[in-house]
């Protein structure tokens, strides 16, 4: 479980997050949505312990992360960014094996257990037959799957994903989301894709100007009353035959807001 | 993910493929060890007095077993050429490993001890001690070079910073700035010196030379090489993580800024000791890691030993050319590595353009 209390983050004089309170239960998938610059990535980085908050705290399984080492964090929290920008001369296996270092120690290197864990993770993400391919030759979707495989080997109970499908086409986007659902025990995903939030997330947080404007189940939160003022658009929610919400947006007409 | 209750089953194909890559890397290490050994035996025999490799091996074998070996040939092989051959090998190994490490830390294939100001710092240290303080002992110069190299990198880190995704790029810019500044300081010291003799020897040293290897210098280089390269091979997984970016480093449980700092300081100390002994030898640290990656991929447990052996062999070859090509005159070895290295860099560039990498 991740518990955030009164989390405030500044960059110089500018306040990026203003007193965020939220609880992310174990086993849930939480989406963070909001317009550009609303503080989504900042919140995710604070959960990952990369930013030092100016106020409040983040607890992972009841422990304040401020006092914990990077290795302690890596054993509990994994992070997948928008795009993996790896060393192109490393192979898929080399990159995925890095996930094992947090548990085994940085000097342990490879070994039979790591090789097997890497093979198993690559089987899950569908790259087992390309284990020795260099990262230079992989597509964006394949690189994201490598990042997810590394997360699997890392074996952390919480996975943070920052717009993991931003650079991907629809098919790869769906595949990655499917993978995230399968592998992540507790996931926090920064998203622009509201449909995925309704389809696959248990909880949605709407962020605007560093504050949580609304939080709760996707059905309750992702409604025009919440989204219109945040995105400054008119939101049209269309329900498909499978009762999944589809969103269309239009710019507000002159004089409307 | 880890299978604790292992049973005897055939390893999955993915595991076998990974093992095959590692086995190939080990074979390269063995092959390069043989190449380097052969190269050393040949280099010991080349010079104004040609000595066949069989005789060289006999003399070295006798010496290593502690048997008395008299005669002029033994003196040439053991007393004159061996220190130089060993120094070339050690320096080539250290500079190449340092290049591979700095390329990983800076996440840039153009990084080498020159680009990050390490050589310039060591040079300034030596120039200051030799020209201003008037000291000339090998250990004093080694200490000055080490202090200069570490000081320069500390300055680069202070100016460039280590944090953020752009951290490595800023590090290179800061390295260039510090390098130019320290080179100017060194040149000024040479210009200002009232001892033409000392200024000339510093200038010759700056071009890189293995012509007068003193036992103390060789010993300090050997210690720097074995400790430095040994430690760096031990922490090779950290280099993999750093070269893969901050997210990967954190996933590996590392604080990327701290890891970069420690690796940079340690590597610059190793290079400082080497530069003190042999002066500024360019291109080896830049070129050899690229060759090594071409042979064994990017994993640093493989790249570092292969770089060390390849770099040792390359500098040994360059130095043998330097001392024999226009004998009895001697070309500074830095000139030879530059002549050999520059075309390779162009080749690398052309390949990068055609493959789009």
Image (cartoon, coloured by chain):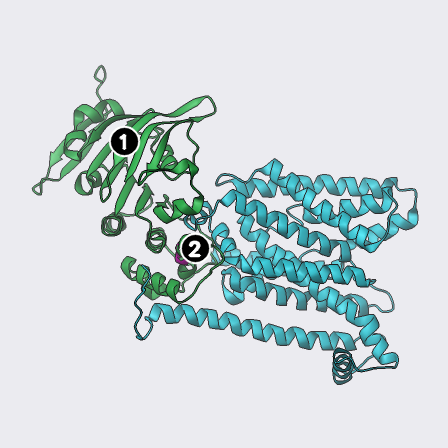
Residue at the limit of the structure toward the left, as seen here? A241
The residue wearing badge 2 is: A101
**Which chain shows up in cyan?**
B
- Magenta stretch encompasses residue A139: no
- Chain A: give its colour: green
Q: Is residue A96 magenta?
A: yes
Mark drawn on residue A22: 1
Q: Chain of mark 2?
A: A
User: In this rendering, does residue A255 appear at all?
Assistant: yes
For disc 2, the neighbor class at 10 Å (few under 14, some 14 to 19, many from 20) is: many
Secondary structure found at label 1 = strand
State which region is magenta: A95-99
Percent of width and height locating residue B174: 62, 39
Residue shown at the point (51%, 39%) measured from the top left: B163
Q: Secondary structure at mark 2?
A: helix
Q: Is residue B321 visible?
A: no
> Residue A212 sits in which quadrant?
top left
Q: Is residue A121 above or below residue B115?
A: below
Label 2, label 1: how far apart the Cα atoms are: 30 Å
């Amino acid at each position: 479980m991740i518990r955030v209390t009164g989390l405030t983050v500044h960059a110089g004089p500018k306040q990026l997050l203003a007193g965020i309170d939220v609880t992310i239960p174990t086993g849930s998938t939480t989406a963070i949505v909001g317009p550009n610059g609303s503080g989504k990535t900042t919140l995710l980085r604070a959960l990952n312990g990369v930013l030092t908050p100016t106020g409040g705290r983040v607890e992972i399984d009841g422990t304040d992360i401020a006092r914990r080492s990077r290795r302690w964090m890596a054993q509990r929290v994994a992070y997948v960014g928008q795009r993996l920008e790896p060393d192109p001369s490393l192979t898929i296996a080399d990159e995925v094996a890095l996930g094992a270092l947090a548990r085994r120690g940085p000097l342990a290197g490879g070994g039979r257990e790591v090789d097997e864990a890497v093979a198993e993770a690559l089987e899950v993400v569908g790259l087992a037959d390309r284990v020795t391919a260099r990262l230079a030759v992989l597509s964006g979707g394949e690189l994201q799957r490598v990042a997810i495989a590394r997360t699997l080997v890392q074996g952390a109970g919480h996975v943070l994903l920052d717009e993991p499908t931003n650079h991907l086409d629809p098919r790869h986007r769906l595949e990655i989301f499917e993978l995230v659902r399968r592998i992540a025990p507790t996931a926090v995903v920064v998203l622009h894709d509201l449909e995925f939030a309704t389809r696959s997330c248990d909880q949605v947080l709407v962020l605007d100007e560093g504050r949580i404007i609304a939080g709760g189940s996707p059905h309750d939160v992702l409604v025009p009353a919440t989204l219109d003022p945040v995105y400054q658009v008119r939101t049209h929610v269309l329900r498909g035959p499978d009762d999944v919400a589809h969103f269309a947006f239009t710019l507000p007409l002159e004089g409307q807001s | 993910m880890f299978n604790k209750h292992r049973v005897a089953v055939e390893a999955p194909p993915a595991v076998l493929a990974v093992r095959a890559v590692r086995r190939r890397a080990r074979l390269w290490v063995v092959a390069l060890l043989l190449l380097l050994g052969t190269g050393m035996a040949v280099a010991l025999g080349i010079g104004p007095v040609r000595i066949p490799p069989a005789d060289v091996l006999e003399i070295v074998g006798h010496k290593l077993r502690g048997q008395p070996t008299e005669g002029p040939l033994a003196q040439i092989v053991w007393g004159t050429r061996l220190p130089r051959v060993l120094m070339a090998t050690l320096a080539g190994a250290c500079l190449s490993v340092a290049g591979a490490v700095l390329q990983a830390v800076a996440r840039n294939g153009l990084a080498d001890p020159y680009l990050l100001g390490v050589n310039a710092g060591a040079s300034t240290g030596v120039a200051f001690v030799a020209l201003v303080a008037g000291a000339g002992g090998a250990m004093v110069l080694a200490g000055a070079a080490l202090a200069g190299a570490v000081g320069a990198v500390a300055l680069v880190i202070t100016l460039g910073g280590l944090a953020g995704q752009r951290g490595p790029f800023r590090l290179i810019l800061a390295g260039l700035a510090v390098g130019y500044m320290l080179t100017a300081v060194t040149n000024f010291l040479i210009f200002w010196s009232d001892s033409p003799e000392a200024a000339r020897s510093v200038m010759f040293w700056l071009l890189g030379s293995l012509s007068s290897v003193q036992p103390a210098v060789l010993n300090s280089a050997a210690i720097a090489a074995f400790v430095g390269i040994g430690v760096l091979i031990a922490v090779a997984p950290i280099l993999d993580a750093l070269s893969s970016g901050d997210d990967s480093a954190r996933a590996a449980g590392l604080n990327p800024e701290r890891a970069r700092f420690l690796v940079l300081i340690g590597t610059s100390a190793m290079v400082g000791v080497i530069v003190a002994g042999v002066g500024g030898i360019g291109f080896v640290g830049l070129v050899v890691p690229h060759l090594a990656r071409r042979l064994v991929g990017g994993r640093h447990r493989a790249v570092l030993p292969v770089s060390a052996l390849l770099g040792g062999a390359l500098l040994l070859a360059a130095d043998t050319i330097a001392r024999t090509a226009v004998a009895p005159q001697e070309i500074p070895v830095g000139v030879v590595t530059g002549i050999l290295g520059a075309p390779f860099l162009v080749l690398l560039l052309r390949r990068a353009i055609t493959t789009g990498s």
